[in-house]
Amino acid sequence: MLPNMPAASREVATNARQILVMLRIPPDHHRPSASYGGDYADAFTIAAQRRRAEDIAHRYGLAFVGNGWQMPLLGVDCYVMQVGPGDTVETAIKRISDDSNVLWSQAMHLYRAEASPSPIVNDPLADLQPVTTAWNLTALHRVATGRGVVVAVVDSRVQLDHPDLAGQFVSSENFVDTDNGPAETHGTGVAGVIAAKAGNAIGIAGVAPRAKLMALRACWQTDATKQTAPTVCDSLSLAKALQYAIEHSADVINLSLSGPPDRLLANLIDIAAHRGIVIVAAYDPTLPQGGFPASAPDVIPVDIDSASTAPSGVYLAPGEDVPTTQPGGQWALAHGSSYAAAHVSGLVALLREDRKNAPVALLATPRLTGGVIDACATLLHAGKPCDCDCPIHAHAIMAGR
C-alpha cells in the first residue's frame, strides 16, 4: 500500500507491478454451454476461463486482479495479475509465458500525453489559431468539413457539454474506471482541435467541425485538481478503447500519447489498419523511434512544426500556442505534439468526407528532416477544389497511409 500518495499516483505505481496475461478464447467445442450461439458473453465460459486464469496466478505466485477483459478481435481474454514484492516483472513474465495455457504475457505499460496547457484565455480565438494561417482553415472549410466522418479520441475524459463541443459526439465510454468525475484537460483540448464547432461566434473552429467524435476515456489526469498535472494511460485501458473504436467503425483514431512498444496494442493497431482505419499518433523525440504507437508501421507520426529536427517520414503540424477547449466551458493555449497529432486527425477527416475507403496521402513541404504538412496541397491531391495557394514543391512523403 502507498497511503501517502494521491489516488491517481498510487494507481500509476501499482500498474508498474502489474502484468497482462493473454489466454486464448476457448474453441466452440470446448465451451460448456450449448446455448452459446456465437456471442462471447456466456456466463459459464467466462467463469471457466476466470478459474483457469486464477489457477495460473496461484501457480506462479501472482495476485489475480479483476475479472479480465474479452478481446474477440484478437481471440484472447486478457487478465491483469500483480507481481509480488519478492519477484521482478521481467522474471514473472518469462515464467508465465512458458506456460502452455498462456498465449503471451507482457508488462502493463504506461503512456503519457504529449502536451502542456497554458493559462486560460477567454476572447474569441479563431484568429489566434496557428492553423488558421498555416493551413488556411477558412479555405479548407469551403470544400470539406469532415461531415459523416467519425474520429475516435482515445484520451482522458472530455467535457461533452462544452459550448464549443456539445452535440459533436456519437458515443462516450470510460475504460479507466466507473467514476463519473469531472472533465479532464488533455482529452477536452484534443477533442476541440479536431472538431470544435465552427461559426458559433465563440471560441475556436476545429479542423473538421462537422466530424463526429467518439470520446473514449483510456487515460486519466494524475491530479484532477491541477490543470497542469500529467495525463497517463496504460496498456489495458488503451486496448479496451482501441477494440471499441474498431468494433464501432471509427474512420480515424487519434492517439495523442507515447510510450514503450506494446504487443497487445500493436496487434489491435494492425487490425484497425487492415480495416481501413487511419491511426494518428504523437511523436516524442525523447523516446526511441519517437515512441510507440508513433513508431508502428501503420501509424501516422506527428510532431510540432516548430521542432528543430524530425526524422524523414515524420509529419509536422501546428502544436505550439494552440488555443483549444478546456474543462469548465473554457479555452486555453496548449503546446505539444498531442495537439499537432489532433490537427492531422482533423485533416484526415476532411480527406475522408467523401472517400471513406480511399488511401490517405498527406503532402508536406520538405525540410532537411521531416516535412511540414501543406493542408491545401493535400486536399488538392485528393481531388478537392481547394482555392488556397500551395507551394508547388509540396510532395507526398507518406502516400498510401
Image (tube, helix red, strand yellow):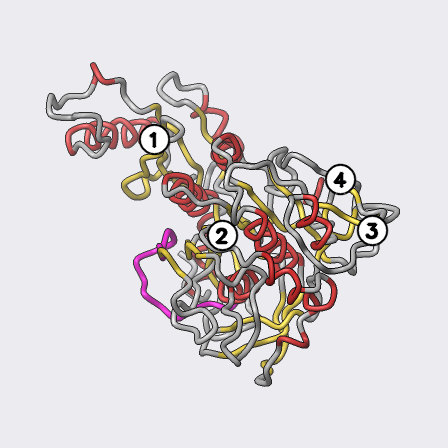
Q: Earlier in the sequence, mark 2 or mark 3?
A: 2
Quadrant (top left, top right, bottom left, bottom right) of the C terminus: top right
Label 4 vs label 2, nearer the camera = 4
Q: Earlier in the sequence, mark 4 or mark 3?
A: 3
**In the image, residue 198 lies at what x, y percent?**
53, 70
Q: Residue furthest bottom?
A: 123
- Residue 193 among magenta residues: no
Amino acid at dot 2: Cys
**Residue at position x 21%, y 34% from top?**
41
Residue 72: mark: 1
**In the image, residue 249 lies at what x, y percent?**
40, 42
Q: CA distance from mark 4 to mark 1?
A: 35 Å
Q: CA distance from mark 1 to mark 2?
A: 22 Å
The stretch of residues the image draws in magenta is 172-185
Amino acid at dot 3: Thr
Q: Which residue is mark 3?
A: 309
Amino acid at dot 1: Pro
Q: Which residue is mark 4?
A: 397
Q: CA distance from mark 1 to mark 3?
A: 41 Å
Q: Earlier in the sequence, mark 1 or mark 3?
A: 1
Question: Are circles 1 and 3 on residues that touch, CB within 8 Å?
Answer: no
User: Which image quarter: residue 119?
Assistant: bottom right
Q: Earlier in the sequence, mark 4 or mark 1?
A: 1
**Residue at position x 59%, y 42% from top?**
293
Label 2 vs label 3, nearer the camera = 3
Out of 287 and 61, give the one closest to the viewer. 287
Label 4 vs label 1, nearer the camera = 4
Q: Which residue is mark 2?
A: 233
Q: CA distance from mark 2 to mark 3?
A: 27 Å
Q: Secondary structure at mark 2?
A: strand
